[in-house]
């Protein structure tokens, strides 16, 4: 699915663990693409969702707000939210905004999947 | 028109030297304020950590205030440039924004002295965590009413520029959550709507802002109830009781500035 300048794909990493691959820019305008992908992962039975940012080009503050909305939805559904593929720059931004206290950061999708199971 | 804060000073965190290419601030563990204007109360910013919706207590609200600048030839970048450089002047009367003397930029910290009911003052602050040509975002410190991100932006919509303030917030502690239910939301909405009216007036536009608000999460985060230990309203109230001359000095300064205006 594509919205604005972001695409997102869903893949299975293991039993109950799905990854959402994020490509392009994450901004407030890309809500539909991200939420549609989240819906697909949830319908596939994911109890843990790994956001794979290795294809991320750019994220603004609207994109960070979007991640909070996603986090709330996941928490409501009893799902864990993890992330991987963040550059050092965006790891710093997760730390600045203290999103890393709610979204676990991992060095690889495999490590995130292992932590989630 | 809002009162202009004439007494500004440079405040900031130590690591303000964000990479020039990045619109994001560098990470800071704790806020540090530089020199403080005489009439500002700096009680609840130094040493505090930033808090966002993850760290807050109350229900999670998303509010979007918008105003349309019809009939004037001004592009989004010009609006944001003006907003950044004259930010304090658009605030409602009685509220003080002691921002950086240059312009709003990533990593800068501003002290806020906010007008509360009963002529009380709430001393708090914000940090600029993001700023580009068409938007900028504040994040609040521990003790502020809200654990929040506030994004100010402008975009072209047809022939007009539309200006938005988007707030993602949780009340920081149970005390603030109660005050939100007892008129706090109304005050917050009036505050930002007045700001937008003042900004529009700066460009010669008379318009009414719109408001969309959604409760994104109705659950309260009880694990964060202890945030009340940093409550800036309580701490400011106690400070003013023990330092009553601060309020007299502030009122004198306001009267002086009022007579200059």
Image (cartoon, coloured by chain):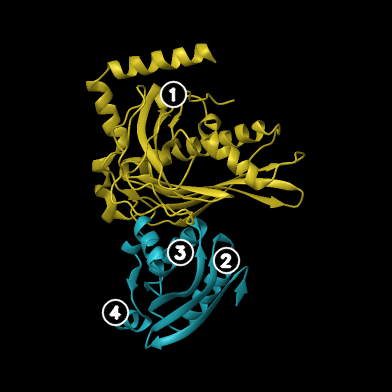
Chain colours: A cyan, B yellow
**Would you name the residue on which mark 4 appears?**
A115
Q: Is residue B217 left or right of residue B45?
A: right
Q: Chain of mark 3?
A: A
The first of marks 4 and 2 along the sequence is 2
For the residues labelled 2 and 1, say whether their Cβ atoms are less than 8 Å apart.
no
Helix, strand or loop at label 4? It is: helix
The first of marks 2 and 3 along the sequence is 2
Q: Which quadrant would residue A76 be assigned to in this image?
A: bottom left
Q: Please, is residue A30 above or below residue B258 in the view?
A: below
**Would you name the residue on which mark 1 appears?**
B7
User: Which residue does the image show at 47% across and 85% down from the upper left?
Assistant: A11
Mark 4 nearby-residue class (10 Å; few <14, some 14–19, many ≥20): few
Q: Is residue B59 left or right of residue A35?
A: left
**Would you name the residue on which mark 2 appears?**
A30
The first of marks 3 and 4 along the sequence is 3
Q: Indicate the position of residue A80 as horizontal and vertical percent values.
A: 35, 73
For the residues labelled 4 and 2, say whether their Cβ atoms are less than 8 Å apart.
no
User: Which residue does the image show at 41% across and 64% down from the upper left?
Assistant: A90
Same chain for mark 4 and mark 1? The answer is: no
How far apart are the alpha carbons under marks 4 and 1?
A: 52 Å
Mark 3 nearby-residue class (10 Å; few <14, some 14–19, many ≥20): many
**Would you name the residue on which mark 3 appears?**
A67
Mark 2 nearby-residue class (10 Å; few <14, some 14–19, many ≥20): many
Q: Indicate the position of residue A81 as horizontal and vertical percent values.
A: 38, 72
Helix, strand or loop at label 2? It is: helix
How far apart are the alpha carbons under marks 2 and 1?
A: 41 Å
Q: Please, is residue B237 above or below residue A27 in the view?
A: above
Mark 1 nearby-residue class (10 Å; few <14, some 14–19, many ≥20): some
Q: Chain of mark 1?
A: B
Helix, strand or loop at label 1? It is: loop
């Amino acid at each position: 699915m594509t919205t604005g300048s972001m695409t997102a794909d869903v893949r299975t990493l293991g039993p109950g663990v799905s990854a959402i691959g994020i490509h392009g820019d994450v901004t407030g305008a890309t809500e539909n693409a991200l939420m549609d992908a989240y819906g697909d992962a949830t319908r596939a039975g994911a109890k843990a969702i790994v956001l794979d940012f290795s294809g991320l080009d750019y994220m603004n503050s609207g994109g960070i707000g979007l991640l909070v909305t996603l986090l709330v939805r996941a928490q409501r559904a009893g799902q864990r939210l993890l992330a991987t593929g963040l550059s050092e720059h965006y790891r710093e931004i997760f730390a600045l905004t203290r999103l890393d206290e709610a979204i676990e950061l991992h060095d690889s999708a495999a490590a995130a999947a292992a932590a989630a199971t | 028109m809002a009162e202009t804060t004439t007494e500004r000073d440079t405040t900031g965190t130590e690591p303000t030297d964000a990479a020039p290419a990045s619109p994001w601030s560098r990470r800071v563990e704790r806020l540090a304020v530089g020199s403080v204007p005489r009439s500002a109360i700096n009680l609840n910013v130094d040493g505090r950590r930033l808090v966002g919706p993850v760290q807050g207590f109350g229900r999670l609200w998303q509010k979007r205030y918008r105003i349309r600048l019809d009939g004037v030839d001004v592009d989004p970048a010009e609006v944001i440039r003006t907003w950044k450089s004259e930010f304090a002047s658009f605030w409602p009367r009685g509220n003080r924004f002691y921002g950086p003397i240059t312009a709003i930029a990533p990593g800068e910290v501003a002290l806020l002295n906010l007008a509360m009911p009963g002529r009380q003052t709430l001393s708090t602050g914000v940090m600029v965590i993001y700023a580009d040509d068409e938007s900028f975002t504040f994040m609040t410190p521990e003790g502020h009413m809200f654990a929040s991100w506030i994004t100010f932006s402008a975009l072209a919509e047809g022939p007009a520029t539309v200006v938005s303030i988007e707030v993602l917030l949780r009340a920081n502690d149970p005390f603030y959550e109660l005050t939100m239910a007892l008129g706090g939301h109304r005050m917050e909405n009036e505050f930002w709507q007045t700001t937008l009216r003042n900004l529009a007036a700066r460009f010669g536009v008379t318009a009414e802002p719109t408001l969309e608000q959604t409760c994104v999460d109705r659950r309260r985060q009880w694990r964060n109830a202890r945030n009340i230990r940093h409550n800036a309203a309580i701490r400011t109230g106690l400070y003013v009781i023990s330092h009553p001359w601060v309020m007299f000095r502030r009122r004198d300064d306001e009267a002086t500035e009022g007579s200059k205006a």
